[in-house]
Every structure is written in structure tokens, then in C-alpha cells.
Amino acid sequence: MKFESAEDLAAKTEGPSSNDITIATNPNGKITKWNKKAEKIFGYSAKEALNQNISMLFSGKNQGKENEYLQEVRAGKAKQYEIACKAKSGKKLSVAFSAFPEYENSGEVTSICQIAYDMTNKEDVEEKESVLYSIIDSSDNAIISKNVKGIITSWNPAATKLFGYTEDEAVGKSITIIFPKDGFEEEDLIIENIRKGQKIENFETIRCAKDGTEKPVLLTVYPIKNKSGKITGGVKIIKDVSQKDREDEKQATLAAIVSSSDDAIISKDLKGIITSWNHSAEEMFGYTEKEAIGKHISLIIPKERLPEEDRIIGSIRRGEKIDHFETERIAKDGTRRQLSITVSPIKNSRGKIIGASKVARDISLRLEAERQQALYTERLQELNKYKDEFMVMASHELKTPLTVIMANLQLLQELLQKDKNVVFIEKAAKQVHKLAELVTNLLDVSKIQAGKLAMNPTEFDLNELLSESLGNLQQTTKTQKIIYNGNGNKLMIRADRERIEQVITNIIGNAIKYSRSPGDIIVKAAKKDGNINVTVTDKGIGIPKKDIENIFLRFYRVSGSASSFSGSGVGLYISAEIIKSHGGKIWAESKVGKGSVFHFSLPALSTK
Ligand code: ADP
């Protein structure tokens, strides 16, 4: 290998353009040549450096190590070594030395030329580069570089995510792999711009992924220059805007909903300044969007209701929503609007409350309907009162002649006991009895309606009352057997004896009436948990599920086969009212075709 002399080299690199540190030493390391760059990097002047050992440049622990590096050079080998150095100022440096031996004609090494590179800054550059690489790698935007021929030279992970090609698949391919079929000429245009050194910024276009899906993107392309300023390619930053498109779409849908809503939709900031005003707000309040935006919301608030606004804003600041708040607002022409308003806080992307949206619904019509309804109900109650009064009066008036007829018929019955024509009197008496019963029931209904069904409570044994009543009821039927399963114990209650008897008669009367075929009627009574429970089980026609809840209502009768039995639909209503007024409960269970079970329970009196 032929090397130039150290001096020649030093002379060559001496000029101001020299970027390298050029030092010459003798074989033992004594500095014999010291150029300007060396002076600049190490801080020692030529005067200070010449004749010193090169190890003066080395940092503390490397002092005296020059022989380690120089002995190979002395033996005729070139040597590269990187060593920690220290400048005159004390600044730490990392320096790479390339040491070359210089020979005399005799072949003896007489001088060593050392070209050194300051690597300290190089490390910075490398660090900067690695930061840049990590930015590119972690960027959400696809970053692709290409040469002037349009061949991809680098491809970051976001590009893989967006287009589906891996780095290996993309690098070396033409950039047109991500072009839609009809968009190739766009690349010519881009290349032309790059060649001219011009950048392209936020150019909206379409690119294609590996699976063929089209991606709306925003493109920015920068030319890449080499050290000498020549354009060697371009770097493309590609932003996926499909998400933004979706958001735009959402925004547009929302805007359409707001503008077409029948409710007035208004937004305001925390100072109460109106920031948006939809079409319905224009119609409701008479102000155009232009007139309303920028004004304070008090524009539509009646004076006496202004404190409301402070309360609303207070809730909004706390992040609370106000739901269906009924109030009044005032339109441009001074008319009052009855409204139901819902106010919700508006938050920015960081969650901070920046204002409120108000949805106002005109409830004037609803309020008017409610007013009419109230008037109607009042009128109805009044008419009902007249009807009830009439019923009381009519029932009373009917009752007196009926009682007289009944008494006379009984008299006749006794007089004509042996006469065969007595049957006609019996028939008449039976019908009059029915009529009297109906009148009594109607009178009871009227009394209940008027809240005047008086109770006359006494203490008595329900067991005894049941035995007595069931005996009487058994007289009315030959086909059914009424079986009483009382255990003989006293079942003391405090109640209106006659009214309770009326309930028993009604329930068992129904059990007899609503049975087509003969079947036993079983009555049970027992004390449990402080109540006397009575059940009446029949094997009659039963009651459909849908009707069971309603049979205790006034005038309710089950339609269908049940309607072929005569009745007025008030018996169970009166029974329920009697039981309830004693603090008891009444209910029924039933299966169509199988029969029914009626229950009632009354508070028991404690028997010692
Ligand atoms: P009604 O005078 O019609 O018998 P109720 O108020 O006593 O009036 O009874 C209401 C309705 O309940 C009856 O019309 C009938 O359809 C039904 N109902 C009551 N008891 C029974 C029963 N034991 N079996 C079947 N249906 C019954």
C-alpha cells in the first residue's frame, strides 16, 4: 500500500475547506503537525500542541495508551481507533483516528499521519436520526418516500395499516400500486412538481388499498434533496380522511335533524349568548336566525321569569340536564308561548362545559286539551252526582210500594193457603222479591258512590253466621249441595253482620247460579295470621282470565255463555266495597269449564 507523506497530506488538508483533523506524529506519538481543524476541535494552538505527545488529547483514563494504538502502525499497519478525548476547555469529545505509517527510503517508519474525525456530533446526528425514524414509525399518517422514477424507497407502519401492503411488499414497487386505475396521470403531475422542487400540500384525492377499497386521503408531498441540492425523490405524507368524512356525514345528519325538527332548538354559551337558532325557533319566536344569534337569551324570556335563566345556567355549569321544564317564553310580537324545555350542557372535546342546548316544545295545545279535559271531568262529576241523587231518590220511591206489595202478597198467600190458585201468588211474590233485591242493590251502589254506605259494626262469630246463611241458601237449590268445612271453632270478627251476610249470599248465590250441572259447593273458613279467611269453591262454568280482574267492577258482567244467566253486575262490586270498608280483601281464581274459587278475608278479633 502506498501512502502519501504525512506532510503532503497535512498540507493538502490545511486550507479553510478542510473538514478533517490532520495531525502528524513521530513513531512515539510526539506531535509534529497540527492543522487548523485540530486547533478548532481540541482548542490547542499549534504552538501548544507541537512537540507534545498525542496522548495529551486523550481523556484521563486513556492517558499513556498511545503505544497501544501506535505500535501496530510503527510495525507498518494502518490502524483505526475511536477514543474518548478531552479538549483544552475540558469538553469531552469522541474522536475516530485513522493512523497511517510513513516510511523513509530505508523502509523505516519515520512518521505517522493521523486523520481524525470528531464523532461527538455524529452521535447527535445519529440520535436525531433515530428520533426521526421513531416519529415516522409511530406516525398516524402514512409516510412514504420514493425516488424521481416513482419507485417506493421507504414505507412506514401507518402506510401498511392504511393500504394493507407490508414494507417488504411495497419498497421497490412503483408508487402507482396505491393509485386508483384511472388516476395514473396524477402521479406525472406530482413528479413534475417534485422535479421543480415544489411541495404539494393537502391535496385531496383517492388512493387504493391492497384489497381494492378506495381511501379518501389528504396528500402532502415534499421533494427530497441530496447534499449537493439535487432532487432525488419525494416524501409523501398521506392522511386518511375517511374518518373525517364519516364525522362530516354525522355532522350533516345532525344539522339536518336540527333544522327539520318541529321543536325549537337553540344553543347558547355560558354567558347566555345565543349561538345557534333553528328553523322552528324562527317560527316559534318570530326572530330570524340572523336577528337571534349573538343576542342574549333574555330576548325571549319574560321579565318576571328572568331569575329562571340564572338557575338554568347554574345547573348547566354543574353539568346537570334540565328535563321537560314547563315555562313560558315571549315571541317577537309579544305573545306568550307555553313551552316544555329540556336544556343539556354542551361539552368540548376535552369535556369542558362550554354552553347549553335548549329544545323547546310548544305545549299550548296540550295545556288547552288538559284544561278542556278538566272542565269535562268536572261536568261529568256534576252529572254523575245528579244521576246518583236520582237513583237514590228513585230507589227509595220504588222501595216503599214494593214493600207494600210484598206484604199484601204474603197476606194473600196465607189466606189462600189451601187454594190451588195460590201458585199464582207465589210466582208474583218471587218476581216482586227479585225486583226488591235489584232495587236494594241499586240503592247500595248509589250509597257507595256517594260515600254513604254506612256500616254498623258489632262483634260476632263468623262461623255461626256462615252456618246459618248456608242453611238458608241450601233451601234455594235442590241440585247443588253446599258443604261447610268450618272446624267448629269460633271465628270472631267485628263487622256489620248484615253486610257480611250480604257478601256471603252474593258469592254463594253466584256459585249456585253459574253452574250448569250439579256439583258440590265447598265453603271453608279458618283463622290464619290474624285474619279469617273464607273460600267458596264451585264446579261451575268458570271465568276467563281476561275478565277475572274486572268482575269486581260496577256493572261488569262476563260476556259469552255467562251472559245467559240473569244478573245486574253489581253484586260483586257491592261485596268488594263492603269487604274493603272492613279492612279486608276479596279476590277470585278460576278456570273456564272447571269452576271458580272466591276468597275473602277479614281481620280477626282475638279470642282468648
Ligand atoms: P251478576 O249479577 O251478573 O251475577 P256479580 O257482580 O255478582 O253480578 O258478578 C259479576 C260477573 O262475574 C257475573 O256476571 C259473572 O259473569 C261472573 N261471576 C261471578 N261469580 C261467578 C261464578 N261463581 N262463576 C262464574 N262466573 C261468575
Image: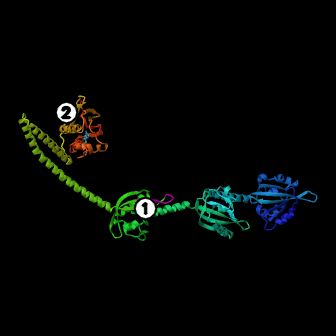
Element marked by disc 2: loop
Q: Nearer the viewer, residue 189 or 235?
A: 189
Residue extending farthest to the left is 415
- Label 1 beta carbon less than 8 Å to ligand 1: no
Q: Where ligand 1 lies, by image quadrant?
A: top left
- The answer to whether residue 154 is visible is yes
Q: Is residue 120 left or right of residue 237?
A: right
Residue nearest the observer in this picture, 508 or 512:
512
Q: Mark 1: which amino acid?
A: Ser
Q: CA distance from mark 1 to mark 2?
A: 78 Å
Dot 1, crowdedness within 10 Å: few (<14), some or many (≥20)? Answer: many
Q: What residue is shown with label 1?
A: 357
Q: Earlier in the sequence, mark 1 or mark 2?
A: 1
- Percent across and percent down for residue 156 are 65, 57
Residue 221 lies in quadrant: bottom right
* Part of the protein shown in magenta: 343-351
Q: How far from the left and from the top, in percent, is residue 572?
A: 23, 42
Q: Quadrant of residue 148?
A: bottom right
